[in-house]
Image (cartoon, grey):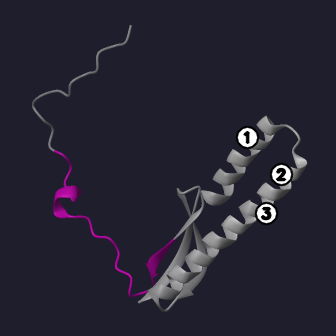
Amino acid sequence: MKWMLVVLVGGITPVNTDLVFDKFADCLAAEEQMRKHYSDAFEAWDRWAAANIERRREYSKARDLQAKRLLGNIGTCVPHGADAQKPVASPDQSAPAAPSSQPAPQPNPRS
């Protein structure tokens, strides 16, 4: 089976890298290398920012944003190609939910 590295930008949005590996271990190694690259980029930015941003409060805010931007991206290896199986819905998930005779409870309004 072949494996493809997919990056989850901000931990949510999947981005296809078109990097395909024959071995799962190779894909994991590429993900680790990607993570190291992001970490190195953040550390380089942090050194620059510490030396160039005069106000501590502005530095702290900028550092938090940069950390989310760079370190929030994660990689994952997913099956790729004809060998990859598509998820199949289980029979109980494919049938629409039967309406219940009891209405759903409503939350109390806040005052």
Q: Position of residue 19 (x, y in %)?
A: 59, 82
Tag 2 residue? 49
Q: Could you tell whether 88 is left or right of 76 in the image?
A: left
- Secondary structure beneath disc 1? helix
Q: Amino acid at mark 1?
A: Lys
Q: Residue at x 83, y 50 (%)?
A: 50
Tag 1 residue? 61
Within 10 Å of disc 1 (Cα), the crowding (few <14, some 14-19, many 20+) is few
Q: Amino acid at mark 2?
A: Ala
45 or 11, which lies in front? Answer: 45
- Secondary structure beneath disc 2? helix
Sequence-wise first label, 3 or 1: 3
Tag 3 residue? 44
Q: Could you tell whether 104 is left or right of 51 in the image?
A: left
42 or 3, which lies in front? Answer: 42
Q: Residue at x 88, y 51 (%)?
A: 51
Q: Residue at x 73, y 48 (%)?
A: 63
